[in-house]
Image: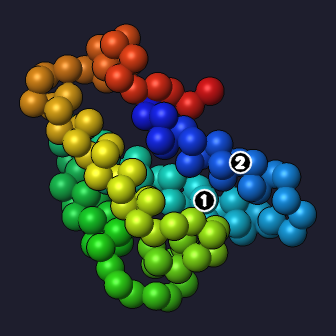
Amino acid sequence: MTSERQDLLYLARNQNENIPGHSDERRLWWAVLDRAIMDITANLEWLSDGQGILAETNRWFNSDEFSPGSFLWVCEQIDVDVEAVLKLVNKLRVARDTAKDSKSTISELHAQNQIRWRV
């Protein structure tokens, strides 16, 4: 996991745990965003429906729809800057594609400290 994603998730945990009035619903929407980031930046080629998951996640991130459950709506609910999330997603995609092009495994990237896991 990159430090940017770790920072985003750390912020999410702190915002949800330390600020009165932050509900389980808010934690749910953070989890939705986290899962979408993982899906759109992961190498899903090994899954039978990997391309379908990637296509659906791309549509979610690129939609200009503002309705419950949409990317823009989720960002508003958890008070996250849309552009910052999209910038993070692009950085993670580049890291994924670089790893795929160089045939690096996730373990190798971790060993080289190019990604870090959530603690």
The tag earlier along the polypeptide, 2 or 1, is 2
Mark 1: which secondary structure?
A: helix
In the displayed structure, would residue 64 be above or below residue 102? below
User: Residue drawn 26% across and 36% down?
Assistant: 95
Could you say which quadrant of the image residue 113 lies in? Answer: top left
In the displayed structure, would residue 113 be above or below residue 13? above
Characterize the local packing of mark 1: few (<14), some (14-19) or many (20 or more) Cα atoms within 10 angstroms: many
User: Residue drawn 50% across and 60% down?
Assistant: 33
User: Which quadrant of the rendered structure holds the C terminus?
Assistant: top right
Residue 13 bears which disc, if any? 2
Residue 34 is left or right of residue 49, and the answer is: right
User: Residue drawn 45% across and 73% down?
Assistant: 71
Characterize the local packing of mark 2: few (<14), some (14-19) or many (20 or more) Cα atoms within 10 angstroms: few
Residue 112 is left or right of residue 94, and the answer is: right
Q: Which residue lies furthest to the top in this view?
A: 111
Where residue 116 appears, as percent x and y from the top left, is 46, 25
In the displayed structure, would residue 74 be above or below residue 46? below
Where residue 43 appears, as percent x and y from the top left, is 25, 40
Mark 2: which secondary structure?
A: helix
Could you say which quadrant of the image residue 42 lies in? Answer: top left
Amino acid under disc 1: Trp
Query: Badge 1 is on which residue?
Result: 30
Residue 25 is left or right of residue 99, and the answer is: right
Residue 15 is left or right of residue 30, and the answer is: right
Given residues 16 and 82, the one toward you in this image is 82
